[in-house]
Image (spheres, helix red, strand yellow):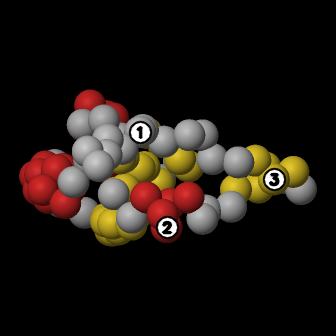
Amino acid sequence: MWLFVFFDLPTNTKKERKAAARFRKDLMRDGFSMMQYSVYNRHCASKESADVHEKRIKNFIPEKGQVSILRITDKQYGNIVNYWGVKEDPLPEGPKQLEIF
């Protein structure tokens, strides 16, 4: 399961810029990787793990701005198509899922 965090935070004042930078640092400290400037993603091994990370995000959301959280399955994540200019770039291989049987 993957968590995506999309955000649009105001950066008009020094206080707002500091809050936005703090939010990005908190995401990275929680294991998120920057996909684009305001899009971060993270793999979670289970729904329970995703619940924990979603709860953490809610605790460090700045007082102003919009933050959206999206959950998708590994299979849905594998269907993402990325383009860098006109060249298609495959996704980096995600973490391996352990299978017991």
- Find the residue positioned furthest to the front: 101
Residue at image x 61%, y 62%?
80
The residue pinned by badge 2 equals: 76
Please determine whether, in this image, residue 81 is positioned above or below residue 17.
Answer: below
- Find the residue positioned furthest to the right: 86
Mark 1 or mark 3, earlier in chain: 3
The residue pinned by badge 3 equals: 88
- Find the residue positioned furthest to the top: 29
The residue pinned by badge 1 equals: 96
Mark 2 or mark 3, earlier in chain: 2
Pointer 3: residues within 10 angstroms few (<14), some, or many (20+)?
A: few
Q: Quadrant of residue 5?
A: bottom left
Q: Is residue 1 visible?
A: yes
Which mark is nearer the camera, 2 or 3? Answer: 2
Residue 13, x across and y down, in percent:
35, 49
Amino acid type of the residue tagged 1 in the rendering: Lys
Please determine whether, in this image, residue 51 is positioned above or below residue 42.
Answer: below
Q: Secondary structure at mark 3?
A: strand
Residue 74, x across and y down, in percent:
43, 58
Residue at image x 24%, y 37%?
30
